[in-house]
Image: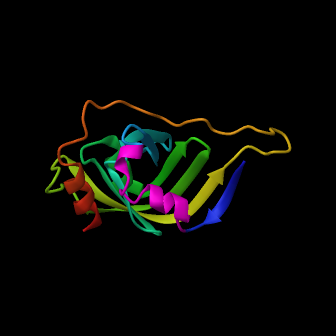
């Protein structure tokens, strides 16, 4: 059951998205969902090398500038991020604006800012599902960390 936490990232989520311990999340994915021109949810997958919290109210994103996701965001400005991992499930909803249509450190990516408007935490209801919890999130494998990962995250914060 989802519970509204407010309009700021909670401390543990802020820490998780701070880009300080990328090794711990190097193979974990963040799901995002925009809304397409037909009002359908449009999912996409980002890595922790493309997402960083600037502060408790702003999350910066690097997303392919020619993608349907960016087109959706430029059209209606709405995005939901889903951060799911062992024993956590957060949904971060907000408004997005483009800060740059290409990044110096990664020209194919647009630099975007998500202004946090609502954060929800999702957990099983102990009354109906005692002991139930999320055991993991979406993962992927990457042969090596992107060569310019730190440059992308630094540019997102700038």
Q: Which region shows up in magenta?
A: 8-24
Residue 155 is a magenta residue = no
**Which quadrant of the view contains residue 55?**
bottom left
Image side of residue 97 versus residue 13, left or right: left
* Relative vertical location of residue 126 with respect to residue 74 in this rendering, above or below: above
* Relative vertical location of residue 25 with respect to residue 114 in this rendering, above or below: above
For the C terminus, which image quadrant?
A: bottom left
Residue 153 point in image, percent of width and height: 27, 57
Q: Nearer the viewer, residue 77 or 104?
A: 104
**Which quadrant of the view contains residue 99?**
bottom left
Image side of residue 115 versus residue 127, left or right: left
Residue 61 point in image, percent of width and height: 34, 55
Q: How is the image coloured?
A: rainbow
- Residue at point 64%, 63% (across, down): 5
- Residue at point 18%, 56% (across, down): 103
Residue 83 point in image, percent of width and height: 51, 47
* Relative vertical location of residue 104 with respect to residue 117 in this rendering, above or below: above
Residue 150 point in image, percent of width and height: 23, 54
* Relative vertical location of residue 122 with respect to residue 86 in this rendering, above or below: below
- Residue 147 in view (yes/no): yes
- Residue 47 in view (yes/no): no
């Amino acid at each position: 059951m989802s519970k509204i936490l407010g309009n700021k990232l909670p401390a543990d989520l802020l820490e998780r998205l701070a880009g300080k311990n990328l090794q711990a999340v190097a193979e974990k994915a963040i799901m995002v969902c925009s809304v397409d021109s037909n009002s359908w949810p449009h999912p996409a997958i980002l890595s922790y090398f493309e997402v960083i919290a600037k502060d408790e109210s702003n999350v910066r994103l690097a997303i392919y500038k020619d993608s349907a996701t960016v087109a959706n965001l430029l059209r209606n400005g709405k995005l939901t991020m889903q951060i799911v991992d062992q024993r956590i499930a957060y949904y971060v909803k907000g408004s997005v604006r483009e800060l740059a249509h290409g990044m110096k450190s990664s020209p194919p990516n647009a630099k975007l800012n998500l202004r946090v408007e609502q954060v929800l935490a999702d957990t099983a209801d102990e009354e109906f599902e005692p002991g139930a919890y999320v055991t993991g999130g979406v993962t992927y494998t990457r042969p090596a960390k992107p060569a310019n990962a730190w440059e992308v995250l630094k540019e997102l914060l700038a």
